[in-house]
Amino acid sequence: MAIKFSTPTQNARILSVGAYRPPRVVPNSELVERIDSSDEWIQQRTGIQTRHWAAEDESVTDMAVKASRIAIERAGLTPQDIDTIIFATITYPYQTPSASTEVALQLEIKNAAAFDVGAACAGFSYSLGLANDMLRSGSAKYVLVIGAEKISDFLDLDDRATSFIFADGAGAVVVGPSDEVRIGATLSGSDVENRDAIAMIPSWTAYKPGSAITETAWPVIHQEGQKVFRWAVYEIAKVGKEVIASSGLTPADIAAFIPHQANERIIDSLAKSMDLPDSVVIARDIRTTGNTSAASIPLAMDALLAEHPELHGKNALLIGFGAGLVYAGQVVELPPQPK
Ligand code: UT7
């Protein structure tokens, strides 16, 4: 007996975006002493002026719930309409149960498919691609896609390569049915030879990812900044060009560029290498938000739409890249202005 695939296919779009930034603003001046740095150096090398850190008692899922509530309301839906929750994060401190199920519990979403995605700074773009594919295969109707991080819990404040870069926050989008294609195909991949370039490791040991953990210690994030920088600048520009072409578009059809907010110099270099016209509005949320890994693209999307309401409904190129090293990107139509 042949297996029948009975669910109807449907196009998808981003219906709405919501964001949550914890109230505590941390200026560079608060961090520089411990790493022998300066506000000027950090701004010149990364673009970061300030970032937000969550309060001690504010969890990554608390932040995610706040961003999700906004996204769901802006979509004109209620939490009970959501049938799938995908949560991209690297800072939820439990292997299981998942962060997505905690969001379901807090928002009283019943019977939804719920799972987490661990693709670091590319996690949001991977998850958005999955949501699109789930709608296209008919296995979901309203997907809540969350990117949220509390990286301040996993920082070594004496590490010159990370302490001033990473930050906290949450962003969420609701993906739902569309009359036309409004999310292009997701291009994703990896460069696993550079797998160790960014890693969350116990702070006291030369632990190698994949080997047995014999003793426990609180993990902190490490990175080989230059290696990641070079990879991002050379490899991700090629990915971006391919993403645009695979959507049947040219750079002239793109209104906004919302890459992962890792370093403003990487953002500038990518825009140049991809020949994006000057008319393209570039997200520079990193300046006041820092690098929030999986949260950075939805946070930057929300900030860009607040600053440029004319971009609602226009095409944007999204690209996430980071630890793994992994990447994912797609062209999307930005959500309509909320009613
Ligand atoms: O989200 C995941 C993806 N992550 C990324 O994309 C991160 C990519 N990497 C970066 O953003 C950059 O590599 C960093 C911001 C981490 C570092 O900037 P850099 O321009 O690559 O610095 P560097 O390591 O090449 O060091 C340049 C100089 C050195 O001094 P000398 O040898 O030229 O005298 C360092 O000692 O800057 C010095 N330096 C610092 N000075 C003040 C390195 N770190 C610091 C610091 N403060 N924190």
Image: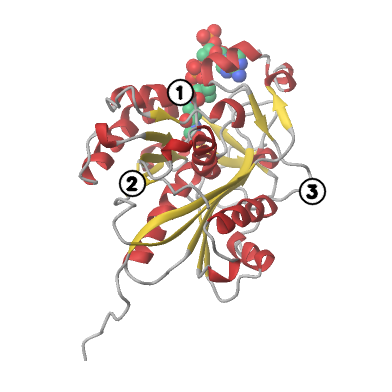
Question: x, y percentage for residue 223?
Answer: 53, 31
**Structural distance between the alpha carbons of marks 3 and 1:** 34 Å
Is residue 23 in view? yes
| Residue 226, numbered label | 1
| Vertical comparison of 165 with 41: above or below | below
**Structural distance between the alpha carbons of marks 2 and 3:** 36 Å
Quarter of the picture containing the N terminus is bottom left
Which mark is first along the chain, 1 or 3? Answer: 3
Circles 1 and 2: CB atoms closer than 8 Å? no
Q: Which residue is mark 3?
A: 57
Helix, strand or loop under label 2: strand
Which mark is first along the chain, 2 or 1? Answer: 2
Q: Looking at numbered disc 2 in the image, what kind of residue is underneath it?
A: Gly
Seen from the viewer's position, the closer of residues 291 and 196 is 291
Question: x, y percentage for residue 38?
Answer: 66, 12
Seen from the viewer's position, the closer of residues 191 and 178 is 178
Task: Tell me the residue at 56%/76% (across/down).
Answer: 111
Q: Looking at numbered disc 1 in the image, what kind of residue is underneath it?
A: Gln
Q: Looking at numbered disc 3 in the image, what kind of residue is underneath it?
A: Asp
Helix, strand or loop under label 3: loop
Question: x, y percentage for residue 289?
Answer: 60, 32
Is residue 208 in view? no
Would you say the beta carbon of the disc 1 residue lies within 8 angstroms of ligand 1? yes
In the displayed image of the protein, which residue is found farthest to the bottom? 1
